[in-house]
Amino acid sequence: MTMADYDSIGVIGGGAWGTALALSAARAGRRVTLWARDTALVAELRTRQSNSAYLPGITFDERLEATTDLAAAAAASALLLVTPAQTTRSLAASLRPHLRPGRPVVLCAKGIERGTGHLLSEILAEEVPEAQAAVLSGPSFAMDVARGLPTAVTVAARDGAVADGLARALASASFRPYASTDLVGVQIGGALKNVLAIACGAVVGRKLGASAQAALTARGFAELTRLGTALGARPETLTGLSGLGDLVLTCSSAQSRNFAFGLKLGEGRSPGDLIASGEKLAEGAHSARIAVELGRRHKVMLPLCEAVAGVLDGQMTIDEALTALMSRPLRREASSD
Ligand SMILES: NC(=O)C1=CN([C@@H]2O[C@H](COP(=O)(O)OP(=O)(O)OC[C@H]3O[C@@H](n4cnc5c(N)ncnc54)[C@H](O)[C@@H]3O)[C@@H](O)[C@H]2O)C=CC1
Ligand SMILES: O=C(CO)COP(=O)(O)O
């Protein structure tokens, strides 16, 4: 696979991350077609070179072709699928008639499908078996990438040559993808860090202290590692950009929507209100319960994820979740010990 195979990039989804990745791919020298379902947004992208709803304050010089025609975006040599995780199945099905066999579809959302517990690559394999699944994940706020601030991510595909080709196609002076073949590990990191970031936000909102926030991040990483390992992830993926890297970013910054969601929970907003308001996408709120279920299926305890799911489901308050976590039976820190 040569870089020329990915000279054009179709981006599916005109939210914050889709637009930022489209800009980044254009800076990398690729021809970019950005698909969004919203005609007003496509008009704004075309005429004002901005996406004021999702990337306020940013105007861009990069050439982007914006379209509401899915077939036009799907004609590119590689596709980035950048809509919320729970929309992956329906969008993949809509893309199928337009995709040529073997085309890489790079899954850029972070989550686990509710109802099935499937990773996004599993959904793609079911809906578009002839596509080549790839994943892009890592510590990367859309606003930072849109501004051209330095960012590093992981791009994984089962075929290492595909991952290398995608990394080369997307690399620019400010965007550095590392190639990987660990599709599962990269997805588990991205999905779980969102749930754990809600917990960290709640700790800060509840004023439980910096020590608690650090403990939660470290014990959260233990959960991410346990589930990842049970599903076959490689340890070096979990300690890499898409695992520990993204966990640290989102567990420590109110720029993260998941952290900000948790912050409001900690300050006393009700989970029902916050979810119903749907102000900003907080993927962890959608995948907390199914992450716990996935853990159960693989006999992996995820007490922090369980606490987040319990609070979000209204089964317990943050204070009750804290008491339950602090009174768990004492245990060795490392499972190998
Ligand atoms: N914003 C960020 O900094 C980053 C986001 N991500 C991930 O990328 C994914 C998307 O996030 P954002 O772009 O930030 O969200 P967003 O809320 O900014 O945008 C989501 C976009 O998807 C569109 N959309 C929603 N449902 C759709 C459907 N059924 N069909 C077509 N379009 C649909 C919305 O209209 C919107 O344009 C999430 O899984 C998120 O975790 C990953 C890395 C960074
Ligand atoms: O995934 C992200 C950074 O890597 C973005 O985090 P939020 O979705 O919590 O804003």
Image (cartoon, rainbow, N blue to C red):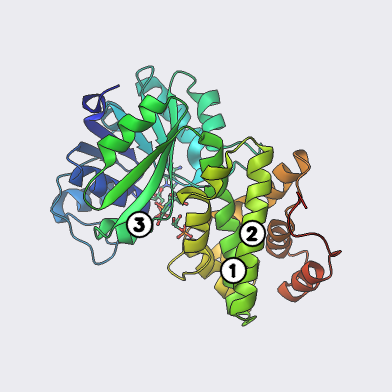
Q: Quadrant of residue 334?
A: bottom right
Amino acid at circle 3: Ala
Spatial separation of the CA atoms under disc 3 and disc 1: 20 Å
Q: Which mark sits nearer the N-terminus, 3 or 1?
A: 3
User: Could you tell me how far apart the alpha carbons at marks 1 and 2 are, in whole angstroms?
Assistant: 9 Å
Label 3 lies in ligand 1 vicinity (Cβ under 8 Å)? yes
**Disc marking residue 200:** 1
Q: From the viewer's perspective, is the residue at label 1 or at label 2 nearer?
A: 2
2 and 12: which one is in front?
2
**Location of residue 148 by image quarter:** bottom left
Residue 302 location, x and y as percent? 72, 53
- Please indicate whether residue 178 sits to the left or right of residue 264 in the image: left
Q: Which is in the foreground here, disc 2 or disc 3?
A: 2
Residue 80 spot, x, y in % from top left: 36, 37
**Residue drawn at x 76%, y 51% as measured from the top left:** 335
Tell me the number on the disc at residue 171: none
Which quadrant of the structure image shows residue 323? bottom right
Mark toward the start of the polypeptide (2 vs 3): 3
The mark nearer the N terminus, 1 or 2, is 1
- For label 3, the residue is 142
Q: Residue at x 49, y 49 (%)?
A: 240
Is 10 displayed left or right of 194 in the figure?
left
Q: Residues within 10 Å of mark 1 (few under 14, many from 20)?
A: many
- Residue wearing tag 2: 220
Contact between marks 1 and 2 (CB within 8 A): the answer is: yes
Q: Amino acid at mark 2?
A: Gly
Query: Is the shortest distance between ligand 2 and the CB of mark 2 under 8 Å?
Result: no
Q: CA distance from mark 2 to mark 3?
A: 24 Å
Q: Secondary structure at mark 3?
A: helix
Q: Position of residue 77 (x, y in %)?
A: 28, 26
